C-alpha cells in the first residue's frame, strides 16, 4: 500500500465534535485519487469482477475503487430509499453504536463467477461486512475481502471476513481533541470543584 495514500489520509483526517471526519478527502482530487489507489492496491491481482459498497461513504469510495480496477460497482443500500427489483435483505448484528441495520442487495447484480471486494471508510465491529459477505455468497459470488480507510477490527472478528486491509489502523489516527463545547464544560466543571 503506497505510503503516499496513508499520509494523505492522515493529513485530511480530522475530528469534529468527537466524530471522525474523512469527508475532506473527497474535496481534494489528488488525495482522493491516491487514497482510492491505496485502497485497491492489495487486491489488484485478485481478479476482482465487482466492488460493493454500503451507503453512504461506501458508495463513493466503492464506485471510485471500481473505476480504478476497471470493474462494476454493486451498491448495498440500507433500509430507506428506492431500490427497485428483486433484492436480498439481511439484518446486521449490532454495530459500534449498538444499532442493527437492514442491508439490501439487488440479486441480479452478482452471480456465480463474480469475485467481490467490499470497500468502505471504516471497519470497527465488522457487522455490516459480515452481512454483505453472506449476501454476496448467497448470490453465488466469491467474497475476496474488504478494504477500508481505517481498520479498527478486532482480531477475533477478522477471521469472519477473510482478508481485511486498511490504509491506517485506528490507533494511528491523531487523538480526538475535545470539542469547544466539551472544553468549556470541562473548564466550568473544574472551576466549580472545591479546592
Image (cartoon, rainbow, N blue to C red):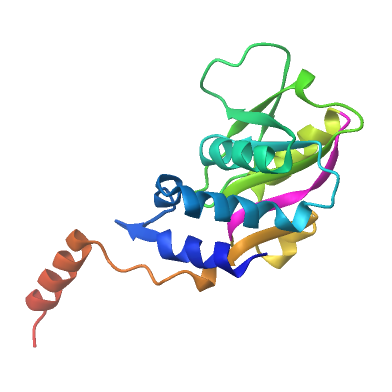
Q: Quadrant of the N terminus?
A: bottom right
Q: Which residues are magenta?
A: 140-150
The answer to whether residue 118 is magenta is no
Q: Foreground residue, 167 or 140?
A: 167
Please tell me whether residue 163 is drawn above or below residue 62 in the rendered image: below
Q: In which quarter of the view is residue 65 placed?
A: top right
Which residue is found at the position 71% from the left and 56% from the top? 41
Q: Position of residue 23 (x, y in %)?
A: 42, 48
Quarter of the picture containing the C terminus is: bottom left
Q: Name the magenta segment's main secondary structure.
A: strand
Q: Residue furthest front?
A: 30
* 146 part of magenta stretch: yes
* Residue pictured at 51% horizontal, 19% vertical: 81
Residue 117, how many percent across, how many down? Answer: 75, 44
Determine whether, in the image, residue 99 is placed left or right of residue 143: left
Q: Quadrant of residue 4?
A: bottom right
Viewer can see residue 123 = no
> Farthest residue in the right direction?
113
Between 90 and 142, the one nearer to me in the picture: 142
| Direction top: furthest residue | 85
Q: Is residue 43 in view? A: yes
Amino acid at each position: 500500500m503506497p505510503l503516499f495514500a496513508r499520509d494523505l489520509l492522515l493529513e485530511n483526517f480530522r475530528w469534529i465534535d468527537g466524530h471522525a471526519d474523512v469527508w475532506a478527502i473527497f474535496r481534494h482530487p489528488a488525495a482522493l485519487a491516491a487514497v482510492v489507489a491505496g485502497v485497491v492496491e492489495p487486491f489488484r491481482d485478485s481478479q476482482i469482477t465487482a466492488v460493493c459498497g454500503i451507503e453512504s461513504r461506501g458508495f463513493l469510495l466503492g464506485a471510485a475503487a471500481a473505476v480504478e480496477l476497471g470493474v462494476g460497482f454493486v451498491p448495498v443500500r440500507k433500509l430507506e430509499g428506492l431500490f427497485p427489483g428483486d433484492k436480498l435483505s439481511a439484518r446486521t448484528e449490532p454495530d459500534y453504536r449498538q444499532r442493527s441495520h437492514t442491508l439490501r442487495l439487488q440479486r441480479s447484480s452478482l452471480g456465480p463467477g463474480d469475485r467481490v471486494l467490499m470497500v468502505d471508510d471504516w471497519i470497527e465491529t465488522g457487522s455490516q461486512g459480515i452481512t454483505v459477505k453472506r449476501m454476496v455468497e448467497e448470490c453465488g459470488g466469491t467474497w475476496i475481502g474488504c478494504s477500508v480507510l481505517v481498520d479498527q477490527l478486532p482480531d477475533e472478528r477478522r477471521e469472519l471476513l477473510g482478508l481485511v486491509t486498511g490504509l491506517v489502523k485506528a490507533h494511528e489516527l491523531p487523538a480526538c481533541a475535545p470539542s469547544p463545547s466539551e472544553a468549556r464544560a470541562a473548564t466550568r466543571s473544574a472551576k466549580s470543584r472545591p479546592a
